[in-house]
Amino acid sequence: MPVATASQTIGPFWHLIEDPDWADLLRFGAGGDTLEDTIVLTGVVTDGAGQPVTDAAIEIWQTSPATTDIFPGYGRSSTDATGRFHFRTLMPGPVASLGNAQQAPHVAIAIFARGLLTGLTTRLYFEGEPLNETDPVLSLIEDPARRRTLIAHAASPRVWTLDIRLQGDNETVFMEL
């Protein structure tokens, strides 16, 4: 009988998604007294049939702002009974890219769930950000409808929503590493 390998299971670390502190990138004190740059990232993960994925682990990474002892730039959230994930973090800024180009503010996302032998990787960009038009990665997606699957919408002040569809109609664009 085959044994699951690290690329086939989240393995002994699954219990870490049960700790809601991992979804709060400000848990060590980042943001200080002013929380103007504090944002919430949320969304629902659905499968190809449009059903919520209730057992997924969602990880995010940010390179902006820079990681410090009080801002890890990394978080992990489980999806709930409705397939929803959430993070509390700082609004990212532009990131230097090769040449003179700048990458638009974004957050990298990895999805681990049932039926996925390896995690899926994508990005979350912010609606209305002028640098989205020239972002070197986002510009690789020629179809505007497909590009929109990576654009989070402001649900309310400082709350951004990006739903992730694993396959089928309106499937989120996933990237190879």
Image (cartoon, grey):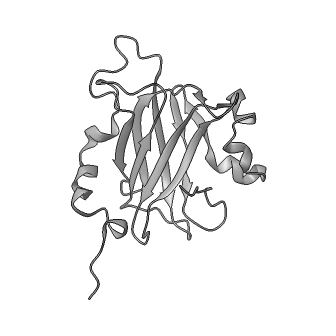
Q: Is residue 40 rendered to the left or right of residue 80?
A: right
Frontmost residue, 103 versus 20: 103
Residue 132 in the image: state x and y as whole percent.
70, 35
Relative to 115, does residue 16 appear above or below in the rendering? above
Residue 134 in the image: state x and y as whole percent.
74, 34
Q: Point out the residue furthest to the top here.
A: 33
Q: In which quarter of the image is the N terminus?
A: bottom left
Quadrant hosting residue 49: bottom right
Q: Point out the residue furthest to the bottom here.
A: 1
Relative to 57, does residue 139 appear above or below in the rendering? above
Q: Residue at x 43, y 50 (%)?
A: 84
Residue 122 in the image: state x and y as whole percent.
55, 51
Q: Residue at x 35, y 47 (%)?
A: 77
Residue 68 in the image: state x and y as whole percent.
34, 24
Q: Residue at x 34, y 21 (%)?
A: 30
Q: Is residue 175 rendered to the left or right of residue 14?
A: right
Q: Is residue 133 rendered to the left or right of residue 93?
A: right
Q: Which residue is drawn at 57% across and 58% down?
A: 176
Total tally of numbered discs in the picture: 0
Q: Point out the residue furthest to the front here.
A: 99
Frontmost residue, 45 versus 31: 31
